[in-house]
Image: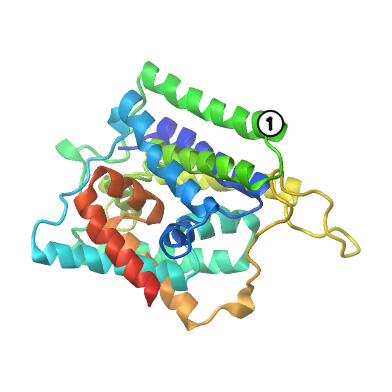
Amino acid sequence: MFTPVHTSLGALLLYQASSGLLLHNGSVLGISSLLSGCVFNPSPDNVSIIAGLVSSVVPVALFMPSLIPSYPPAPSSLISLISTLSTGFMLGWGTKNGRGCTSGHMLCGVSRLSPRSFIATAVFFTTALLTANFARGGQNIPPCAGGVPCYTPVYPATADLGFMVGTMLVAFVTNVFIVPRTLDRSERSRTIFSYLTGLEFGLGLLFSGMADPIKVLRFFAFLTDSSRFDPSLALVLFFGIVPSLMTYLSMKPGQKIKGGAEQPIKPTLADQWRLPTATVADIDWRFVTGAVAFGLAWGLRGVCPGPAVLRTVLQPAWGLAQMTGFMLGNLV
């Protein structure tokens, strides 16, 4: 169902996480590379972000369990196991070769006006849209229960609204006021904030509905069946990307000023910016096919790397198969 309040508040948390990591640690919140890095090249940066993402399940389960998604069944047969492994492989191979996913390209890259991210997003979004609507004989997107149109709005109860608003305000105060005043430029400080980033990002995924694969798939339904269309995730694009774009244009992280000198501002907790340097000239067939492969996996299952981590915590049997495939995809 359409959740305008939940999704808007969740998207603002996604913005807090991505812009906070950029301004404080000087880096981009690309979950796919952070996830593979935890296995193949662990560091305080990637391990702490994924740890924060994992732990975001705890406060939601305690205070707002209605936001925990009802997932499809975990693999229970050889065929379903192979299917989950294959989807995970496409997800891993696609994000590795496409150099990112919905977080790195769509949330962070588009808001930094990166031409490569615009191209990658257009490719994987279009692929996911077509896949979601036409895979499995057009039955890939389930209807809402009771025959109610999925665009029917639902709103949070007062207690749930208080929890979400309070969480978003705590994140804002922490990122804008507490971190710059209490943490210094050190690896320890960056590790602490990386954990907070993962926590905020995970809460944003759960609040917004991005963690629910069925809700994601229903967003794609506008192409073929309006009764199954849930417009919630359009609000993620608006409240996640637009504020990030405004922050990027106003703060100019990593940009040069007139005359070619580096802008004097530095990240709050780091000595230098660590931003992607590749350009459109670096786009090759692997980049394009990687974006297509990621789009196929996203359109089939409604799961991208960030939500996959949360689902792995909540549904370990599925996660074992999916993450095995993901890591194998990263090895190719």
In the figure, 218 relative to 145: above or below? below
Q: Position of residue 188 (x, y in %)?
A: 61, 43
Horizontal arrangement in the rendering, residue 246 relative to residue 203 (left or right)? right
Q: Position of residue 147 (x, y in %)?
A: 17, 39
Q: Position of residue 204 (x, y in %)?
A: 45, 39
Label 1 crowding class (10 Å Cα cut-off): few <14, some 14-19, many 20+? Answer: few
Residue farthest toward the top in the current orientation of the protein: 158
Quarter assignment of residue 269:
top right
Q: Position of residue 255 (x, y in %)?
A: 76, 58
Circle 1: residue type = Thr
Quarter assignment of residue 27:
bottom right
Q: Which residue is drawn at the image coordinates 75% and 46% (left, top)?
A: 250
Horizontal arrangement in the rendering, residue 96 relative to residue 129 (left or right)? right
Q: Which residue does the numbered mark 1 point to in the structure image?
A: 182
- The residue closer to the viewer here, 130 or 51, is 51
Q: Which residue is drawn at the image coordinates 35% and 32% (left, top)?
A: 58
